[in-house]
Amino acid sequence: MDFELYYQAKRTCVIWLPELGCLKIEGADHLDLLHRITTNDVRNLQSGNGQVTLFCSELGRIVARAILLRFDSYVLLVTELSMVSELAAWIEKFIFIEEVRVEDVTASTKGLTLIGPEAANSVTDRFGGDISLLCDWQHIHFFHNDAAVFVVRTVEFDMDGFLILSSKEAIAELQEELDVEGIPNIDKDIYNILRIESGWPYADIDYSNNYNPHETAMLPYVDFKKGCYIGQEVIARLDTYEKVKNCLVRISIDDTKQPDPESIVVFGNERIGTVTSSAYSPDSEKVLALALLRKKAVEIGKQVTVQSENNTFTAHIEAEL
């Protein structure tokens, strides 16, 4: 792996072309419907603002996580590509007499992310406007080479980040411009290191519909004051009665080898969880991993053992996410 790209990500702008799924939700009742079936407060979100919200089952388990962007007459949901079809079907399941239309615009909406200390300057130089004034998940509209472009301030990593959404053709042109300027395009391996370092879980890897928001470090996307939504009773009860069984943590492994996905985490002779994803961190000079562990077994600094099919690793619990 070329770790030079990793260090460039730490000191300058880096782009990554994400695999995005996008749904356009519109109609007279679209805000009311989304408010009733998501964990965050949608009705009071103003145009130009955004948030991360969750769609949960009646059992409080996560169906999908999405960036919700509010526009004047519609909402755009940005999620992982692997989840977009399931999310569309889930929303349509709750449409009865409401005037709501769900359109999959994944094919016509592409994106790239600029991250790094110089990301804000790069975006401002290209599109104009004072990007530094944007709050988390706020978005602003520009035209670039006659194409409509939306810039969203993101907080996926421990550094400035901006998601740029536009047509397939416009994003391809923008990527070519950035390549000419020498701004490198990082690959998925480097992206994986950055997201694990910052504790950003990924769909079907670090979380799934087997787990609830308490267990997967997603409580910041739950509004406990908004009232009823699908799964609200279970999520609230888990909080009130402290019945959460698992939690997502970051562990460090004193090795350069990565454990296999779903490697077992053991304390003593007791299995306490599994590794969900891992990557070698050049900054830490060790492997970092995200793991779902039994909450009662989590103690910061605790030494545990990670058992892969052909290797056994000594690890320490670094942080509860």
Image (cartoon, helix red, strand yellow):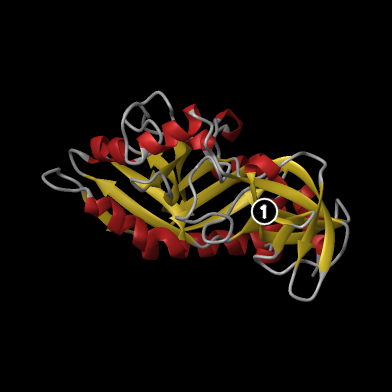
Question: Does the rendering let one see residue 159?
Answer: no
Q: Residue furthest top?
A: 225
Residue at the spot 65% in from the left edge and 65% down from the top edge: 262
Give whichever of 4, 240 is nearer the camera. Answer: 240
Q: At which x and y percent is residue 307?
A: 76, 66
- Quadrant in which the C terminus appears: top right
Give whichever of 309, 140 is nearer the camera. Answer: 309
Quadrant assignment, res 265:
bottom right
Residue indicated by mark 1: 291
Residue at the spot 46% in from the left edge and 43% down from the top edge: 142
Image side of residue 242 versus residue 225, left or right: right
Residue 236's place in the image compared with 196, above or below, is: above
Q: At which x and y percent is residue 212?
A: 48, 45
Give whichever of 2, 305 is nearer the camera. Answer: 305
Quadrant assignment, res 16:
bottom right
Number of other residues with Cα within 10 Å of mark 1, as a class: few under 14, some 14 to 19, many 20 or more = many
Q: Residue furthest front?
A: 269
